[in-house]
Image (spheres, rainbow, N blue to C red):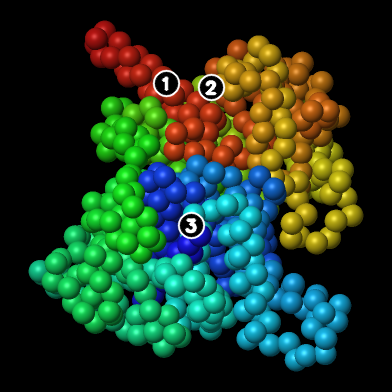
Amino acid sequence: MHYIVISGGVMSGLGKGTITSSLAHLLKYSGLNVSIMKIDPYLNYDAGTMNPYQHGEVFVLDDGSEVDLDLGNYERYLDCDLSGENNITTGKVYKEVIERERRGEYLGNTVQIIPHVTNEIKRRIREVGNKHDLDVLLIEIGGTVGDIESMPFLEAIRELKRESPPNSVIMCHVTLIPEIGPNMEQKTKPTQHSVNTLRGIGIQPDIIFCRLKGQLSLESRKKIAAFTDVLEEGVIGISDTRNLYSLPEQMHDQGILNYMEKLLGYEKLKFNNPLSEFNANIDNPREKVRIAIVGKYTVLQDAYMSHKEAFVHVTGNTGIAVDIKWLDSDSLKEDQRELNDVDGILIPGGFGYRGVEGKIIAARYAREHNIPIVGICLGFQVMTIEFARNVLGLNGANSTEFDPSTENPVIDLLPEQIGKHDKGGTMRLGSKDVIVKEGTLAMSLYKEKLIRERHRHRYEVNPAYMEKFHEMGFIFSGTDIEGVRMEICELKGRKNYLAAQYHSEFKSRPLRPSPMHRFLVEMALDRKKEMMMSEGDIESTQ
Ligand code: GLN
């Protein structure tokens, strides 16, 4: 069993999560049993209460854990389901240590970062490593070396290495190579400094991933190797690429697998890339559609990371490229023409009232102009509210999240939420069964009566209004097992209008794209072709 630890240097935002995922992918599809865990040095217990504006999307796992968005990348690149134990935070570690101290388990000793906190970190790492009969556990350490917050974790890794058999803990360090001047000269100094900082903590890297725009030159590689004591074959360039699923191939082309064989003591690892055809479709798509994502966190697109990825998965499987138009929902209040040039609309999840009226406008526009639309979570709720207001004529229909005293609470608090005050980890979270009704549009997508999808919500469709919706052709074509929680909705006679209370984007995988996203893209292409044909008709009659 080996540990491969990935730390970051120079600055944040170098794509450490994607590099970690790509390395894991390469090892898994070379025949090894691989998993990944993420260490987030922040004090929050988990990502659940974090603002997507600051940190990007909150990702949800099957077991209901709310985790860093990198876990989403791990699941996508490894095609596996992870659990909460794969994400350690300072908050989780300290909570455990303090609770143990309160129970008197430290027998009167002074509780300290070394050894008590570092021991707890190692315990958690080893637990994941031992539980799943792994060949390799990759551990990504969030933040940048030198941050105060990440110190205890790096110290724990140093101890882990010292306490493990030789060569069983491999260290990787991700750095930036700036390219400056008219000749794009590659500069290695920031890498040298960053490796020095790492060595100051007692950690010598075995591999350095150098993030840069172009190709890492031989000269830079030699220089980095000379200054950092890493073998030349362990200095790997990570060049900018449009398709991040091609990164494992990029690493492979630089001979990393041969080097890994030596480091890990394996013979003849051979990479069988399951994504060759997938990548070819992304590199050379045959069609293209434009989809608006109508949200309120659109300035930070990482807030919708899994939606972006789900669309990439659709492209890899269908050859239909998706050009995403990021639309701030508030802007639609003044000008709906922003929706004129799109082939489809996605209304994603969200919290709080800001932006909701704009989303309602988008939902109405899609319904009235026959534009393909998919709503997810808040998007589902918004489409329900829009229909209630504008078709059922229910005055001021709303969610009690936005208007607690609305006369028509078509979206209301889940019964089990009443009386809950804590915000962290208290929503309806994680994988739940959904029953898909026969003979519906939803069934034509899923082709299965029972599906399991991931959830993250506090509010739901108020069952008291169900009959009214059904009478007017607004069908709830998916429910929970008891039939009281509405999970999917669609419109009678409409082939391109669909929404789900669950987050289908969280389970989208490269070779198994989210059915909802695939549906939206295919319907968007249909509509684009129809529009082109009718424009052609107009021209030919002129
Ligand atoms: N705010 C809504 C709720 O809590 C929707 C949540 C979401 O979109 N994830 O039910």
The single residue placed furthest to the top in the displayed view is 541
- Pick whichever of labels 3 and 1 is earlier in the sequence: 3
Q: Earlier in the sequence, mark 1 or mark 2?
A: 2
Locate residue 263 relative to residue 311 in the image: left or right: left
- Check the image and report above or below for 219 versus 539: below
Check the image and report above or below for 357 versus 481.
Answer: below
Judged by depth in the image, the label closer to the viewer, 3 or 1, is 3
Residue at image location 75% in from the left, 50% down from the top: 427
Name the residue tied to disc 1: 527
Crowding at mark 2 (Cα within 10 Å: few <14, some 14-19, many 20+): many
Query: Quarter holding the C terminus?
Result: top left
Marks 3 and 1, Cα distance to the nearest angstrom?
A: 47 Å
What residue sits right under mark 3 in the picture?
136
Q: Looking at the picture, which amino acid does disc 3 mark?
A: Val
Spatial distance from mark 1 to mark 2, Cα to Cα?
9 Å
Image-quadrant location for residue 54: bottom right
Task: Give the amino acid type for the residue marked by disc 2 in the picture.
Answer: Asn
Give percent across and percent down for residue 129.
58, 59
Residue under pointer 2: 496
Q: Residues within 10 Å of mark 1 (few under 14, many from 20)?
A: many
Regarding mark 2 in the picture, which secondary structure is present there?
loop
Hey, what amino acid is under mark 1?
Answer: Arg
Give the percent coordinates (x, y) of residue 193: 32, 84
Q: Residue at x 39, y 24 (%)?
A: 525
The CA span between labels 2 and 3 is 44 Å
